[in-house]
Image (cartoon, helix red, strand yellow):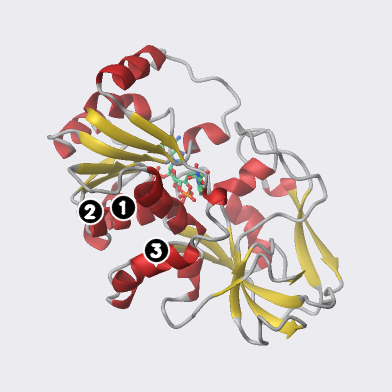
Amino acid sequence: MRSPVNRQITLAARPHGNPKESDFQIVQRPVPVPGDGQVLVRNVLVSLDPLNRILMGNANSDQPPIALGETMFAFTVAVVEQSNNPAFAVGDHVAGTTGWQDYAVSDGSDLRIVDPDIAPLPAHLGTLGMTGLTAWVALTVLLNPKPRGTLLVTAAAGAVGSAAAQIGKLRGYRVVGTAGGPEKIRHLIEDLGLDAAVDHRAPDFTEQLAHAVPDGIDTLYDNVGAALFPALLPHLNVNAQIAVGGVMSQITRTEPFTGPDHLPDLLRAALYKILTIRGVNVTEYHGHSYPEFLADLAPAIAERKLHYGTHLVQGLETIPAAFTQMFTGRTAGKMIAQIS
Ligand SMILES: NC(=O)c1ccc[n+]([C@@H]2O[C@H](COP(=O)([O-])OP(=O)(O)OC[C@H]3O[C@@H](n4cnc5c(N)ncnc54)[C@H](OP(=O)(O)O)[C@@H]3O)[C@@H](O)[C@H]2O)c1
């Protein structure tokens, strides 16, 4: 349903730790009018990402926050409502970064046309969108893409993790995932076809892990950071490669980690196991890498081999409450709000 006004979710307060509903405000503004060369888009799906928490400020991140009162940034799938730009026709579906709001104008430089027939629209925000691209860049461009041995993916039931795990399977790795809770473990094995899955919340996590990687870990795609990494470190094989894709356990922390200092273990392992450790920053690839990424996944898309798990909520007004769930581990798949 079309909104007669442009509802925008703006940043009302900077959180400490987990975000709260009161950190956001919903304001109403007139629907913007596109100028020369611009298009007016109506957002249909908006993405909820850990990046949104980082942009709110007071996060363990080097990324500068947005200003108080600013509309929240978001990856989106939208429909072109008016076009003064020959590259876009009314009715085109586009993926962009048009924010937590009903409407936006754009000169088109941040928009790419998506084909709703190749996959359901939410997939273009998840496995075929920014989160899938992140995993693909890591496993294809940044690390040695020649598959061998065991790939372990942390937070494998999450948006990036489920893409990394599935790309790993397509590449021929033996893929092991970590996730929290029995339902996510079932999902990883039965829906995503992983070779093994380990519940990091279970009391016997370390035993489960040792059992799941009897031949060690050759490639690690890590979304979690310091909360899990010390347990994984002893299982890394010589010449193991590590993509540091996210530090989910560190983003909202307000206190330093307590317990043993694992830095000496990491440095020793880096030396004697000859580790390759690569940070991942999808923004370096976001503008130009989609054609190659989608072409690479095209056979799997056509054969319907990919699973596009989503945690879908309905309505723009539900976003603040839904977003507070993101850091509890209670969500699985790509978090998306359908707003029109
Ligand atoms: N490098 C880049 O360019 C790039 C791009 C996109 C995203 N990212 C990062 O990638 C990470 C994952 O993003 P996403 O969109 O996939 O998030 P997501 O779908 O919300 O998945 C996050 C999952 O992480 C797990 N988790 C959270 N806190 C944890 C903790 N303390 N210990 C262990 N596990 C914890 C939870 O699942 P379980 O409890 O089930 O494991 C949670 O559901 C984030 O850190 C994000 O900032 C980076």
The Cα atoms of the two marked residues, 3 and 2, are separated by 15 Å
Looking at this view, name the residue that lies furthest to the bottom.
Answer: 90
Going from N to C along the chain, the mark reached first, 1 or 2, is: 1
Tell me whether the residue at label 3 lies in contact with that at label 2, contact meaning CB atoms closer than 8 angstroms.
Answer: no
Mark 3: is the Cβ under 8 angstroms from ligand 1?
Answer: no
Give the residue type that dot 2 points to: Leu
Residue at 27% from the left image edge and 70% from the top image edge: 305
Tell me whether the residue at label 3 lies in contact with that at label 1, contact meaning CB atoms closer than 8 angstroms.
Answer: no
Q: Alpha-carbon neighbours of circle 1 within 10 Å: few (<14), some, or many (≥20)?
A: many
Q: Alpha-carbon neighbours of circle 2 within 10 Å: few (<14), some, or many (≥20)?
A: many
Residue underneath mark 1 = 165
Residue at 49% from the left image edge and 80% from the top image edge: 116
Q: Which mark is residue 194?
A: 2
Residue at 17% from the left image edge and 37% from the top image edge: 213
Mark 1: is the Cβ under 8 angstroms from ligand 1?
Answer: no
The Cα atoms of the two marked residues, 1 and 2, are separated by 7 Å
What element does badge 2 sit on?
A: loop
Give the residue type that dot 1 points to: Ala
| x, y percent for residue 11 | 76, 49
Residue at 50% from the left image edge and 74% from the top image edge: 121
Q: Which image quarter: residue 36? A: bottom right
Q: Which mark is residue 284?
A: none
Q: Nearer the viewer, residue 13 or 267?
A: 267
Residue underneath mark 3 = 309
Of badges 1 and 2, nearer the viewer stands: 1
